[in-house]
Image (cartoon, helix red, strand yellow):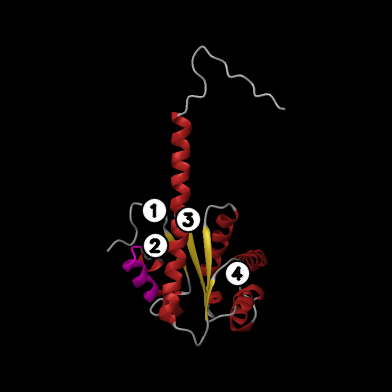
Amino acid sequence: MTIFSANRAHQVFLNYRGEQLRYSFVSHLIDAFERNEVNFFVDKYEQRGKDLKTLFVRIQESRIALAIFSTRYTESSWCMDELVKMKKLANKRKLHVIPIFYKVKEEDVRKQTGEFGDNFWTLAKVSSGDQIKKWKEALESISDKMGLSLGDQSSEADFVKDVVKAVQSVVAAFELEDKEKHFGKKKRKDCKCELPGYKRSRTKKL
């Protein structure tokens, strides 16, 4: 079973609250990724004892990240710090982030309200002002992107399929983009714009 293959061109990084989702939604999502041969990274396979910088490297090695927002997401400063890193890379167009709203309202994530917001402000009480500012900016920025939402009365099995399809769609777009870049470079390399002994004439504007 390949979890982290040598070809990391479309590596998907999962950002989520482990204590709430690891053995439920995320376990189903991992199973679906494996069945559909989606290359991904999830921190349950990371060696314990390593610091957050290691996960930052994993994020940088990825081209896609899923920010899986749930009610307890904001209990974790690790989740929040990963999100800040994801926002920075997304702003530089180095990472495609898909927000996943798991039984939480988009508005609650964006404005830090409801149970999601209550947990955020509890964490904020033991955090620095600079941290809080960066976290709020990341939550507002990422939640404003096109994403997927699961309500309380929705089918989780169908939702997992929708997430896989969304990831596959982004991967397909990346593959097309990579092919166009490859053939573009090859075309420029093979093209002889000027032959020896000849000068290119200027095109006259009429």
Q: Position of residue 30 (x, y in %)?
A: 37, 70
Q: What's under tag 1, amino acid-wise? A: Arg
Q: What's under tag 3, amino acid-wise? A: Ala
Q: Nearer the viewer, mark 3 or mark 1?
A: 3
**In whole angstroms, how far apart are the C-alphas of marks 2 and 4?**
22 Å
Q: Are marks 3 and 4 in contact (CB under 8 Å)?
A: no
Q: Which mark is residue 173?
A: 3
- Magenta stretch prevailing secondary structure: helix
**Which is nearer the N-term, disc 3 or disc 1?**
1
**Which is nearer the N-term, disc 2 or disc 3?**
2
Identity of the residue drawn at 47% across and 66% down = 166
Q: Secondary structure at mark 3?
A: helix
**Between 27 and 151, which is closer to the camera in this rendering?**
151
Q: Position of residue 48 (x, y in %)?
A: 37, 66
Q: For this view, does 45 lie left or right of residue 109?
A: left
Q: Which mark is residue 8?
A: 1
Q: Position of residue 68 (x, y in %)?
A: 50, 72
Residue bounds of the magenta highlight: 27-41
Task: State the residue lying farthest toward the bottom.
Answer: 153
Q: Are marks 2 and 4 in contact (CB under 8 Å)?
A: no
Eyeballing the image, is 125 above or below 174? Answer: below
Quadrant occupied by the C terminus: top right
Q: What residue is shown with label 4?
A: 143
Q: What's under tag 2, amino acid-wise? A: Phe
Identity of the residue drawn at 64% across and 21% down = 202
Q: What residue is shown with label 2?
A: 40
In the image, residue 24 lies in the stretch drawn in magenta: no
**In whole angstroms, how far apart are the C-alphas of marks 3 and 4?**
22 Å
Q: Are marks 1 and 2 in contact (CB under 8 Å)?
A: no
**In whole angstroms, how far apart are the C-alphas of marks 2 and 3?**
17 Å
Q: Nearer the viewer, mark 3 or mark 4?
A: 3
